[in-house]
Amino acid sequence: QPATLGRGDAGSTKAAAHFVFVPLNEQGHLIPAVDTALLLATHGALCTIVAPPSTAARVRHTVDAARHSGLPVRLVEFPLDYAAAGLPEGADHADRIEPRYMMSYYRAVALLRAPIERYLRARAPYPTCVVSDFFNPWTTELAAGLGVPRLSFFCMCAFSILCQHNLERFHAFAGVEDSNEPVVVPGLETRRVVVTRAQAPGFLRGIPIPEWEVLADYIERARAEADGVIFNTFLELEPEYAAGYAAARGMKVWTVGPVSLYHQQAGAAATLASRGKGNNDTPAVDAAGCLRWLDGRDPGSVLYVCFGSIAQPEPKQVVELGLGLEASGHPFVWVVRNAGGYDEAVRGFLDELEARVAGRGLIVRGWAPQLAILSHAAAGGFVTHCGWNSMLEAIVAGLPVVTWPHFADQFLNEKMAVEVLGIGVSVGVKEPLTYQAVKKEIVVGRDVVEAAVRSVMGGGEEAERRRRRVRALAAKARAAVQEGGSSHANLLDLVKRFEPRDN
Ligand code: UDP
């Protein structure tokens, strides 16, 4: 059922707010930032997305489709100066770059400040607000140079951001030697949450490279000095954590999600199956074929398995996961990212598994139309790495989750799903796969996979309760973005608040 988000007063003669979006070239950051821009444009604001060509390529088709539907949005490319930043030519996808070039990548993107500012000064209408991914701290200077406010864009939930923030500001890990020793997250009023330093080390913290700490400090300063925060979440999901973060930072928070619902409104559904697909090196599956396959399955019967755009399970893990899915007996769609990068043994294993489970299991080698799959009636559950976008997309679809965090905010997101919301079953991974640049050999066995899948997909009282809880949240999510809802109101507030002053 497409949501009616209610178009804004785009035909008004008053000058509109003009947001400049500066996203990060990681799918999990880029996709929701673009969706947020499109939602603001839906309500009449002009949105200019500025990006290097490789970033723009990933979202060009989504933005073009929105433009053709009449939304005031533009995507402007600024080439990177590879030589000046010491970055190898073409190494410009933050989610695929070799770690040793990461700093050069950030340097190269930061060098775009001057050309972006020149461009924005030369073309009317003048911007009224910069919205930047929190990983782009140099936008502090961009906004200051333009003389406009700057909002941080978070593609993470308020719960995880607040936990991380409190762990840092109250020095919760001070004196704790063992990175696997659990500590209580300070400053949460209504809930006791326990986490280890390995699970929540802070953004770019704990990596034994001095330059990273400098970047982490710069990012923290930029976050502290922002004029406000936009979250891809909705208020009813986590009111105390959104309010908690606003209070802790002393800044206004706008919850505007779930932004994926942009693609589920009438008129924008064309991009539902192709969102994020401009991911050039991973061949996209034939979305129509995938959806036809789902058409042939019973409602609520199919498990969707995907670890997002970065996580890449080790060969042993691919085999255990595959055997666990097979043993569970449930139909599944399993997304194997960069499947061509595995050796012959793993590729052969996947081929044989596919033959054995023909008709019951579909393996997608590459980029999958995740939103379209999750919103298909046949979908019944989601094995996720707990990236926040995936988690929120599961909630929108009303699907319980098997939680399998790999790194970054994913362990806190898992706590959100399992402990706070009660919509998930954990596979029990306790440590990130890579911590302080050291790779860990963590393999979840086939039996554990099978048990978690059976628990989420099966009958039984707890499984039913989980389903009821997540379906209730799905209804709240939809209500939030519709006329009268909290996210809808926050979008309108942003558009109004950042109108040009002389209106
Ligand atoms: N995604 C997709 N197809 C894929 C893999 C991922 O459409 O095959 C999308 C997914 O819907 C989500 C985003 O990519 O919007 C991944 O973001 P998330 O925060 O879940 O994880 P990350 O990739 O940042 O680890």
Image (tube, grey):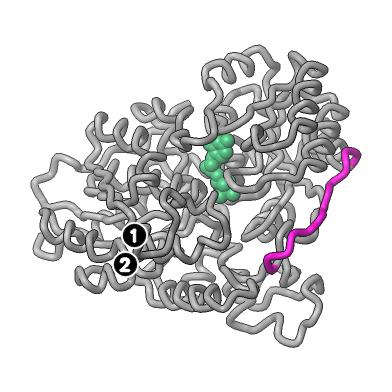
- Look at label 1 and name its amino acid: Val
Dot 1 alpha-carbon crowd within 10 angstroms: few under 14, some 14 to 19, many 20 or more: many
Residue identified by numbered label 2 = 150
Where residue 409 appears, x then y in whole percent? 62, 60
User: In the rendered view, would you say 413 is above or below 104?
Assistant: above
SS at badge 1: strand
60, 41: nearer the viewer: 60
The earlier-in-sequence mark between 2 and 1 is 1
Residue at (80, 31) in percent of width and height: 345
Residue at (78, 46) in percent of width and height: 425
User: In the rendered view, would you say 107 is above or below 442?
Assistant: below
Q: Is label 1's Cβ within 8 Å of ligand 1?
A: no
Q: Classify residue 56 as left or right of residue 372.
A: left
Where residue 416 appears, x then y in whole percent? 67, 56
Where residue 399 appears, x then y in whole percent? 66, 36
Residue identified by numbered label 1 = 131
Residue 234 visible in image? no
Q: Classify residue 203 as left or right of residue 38.
A: right
Q: Are marks 2 and 1 in contact (CB under 8 Å)?
A: yes
Residue 8 visible in image? yes
Residues shaded magenta: 436-447
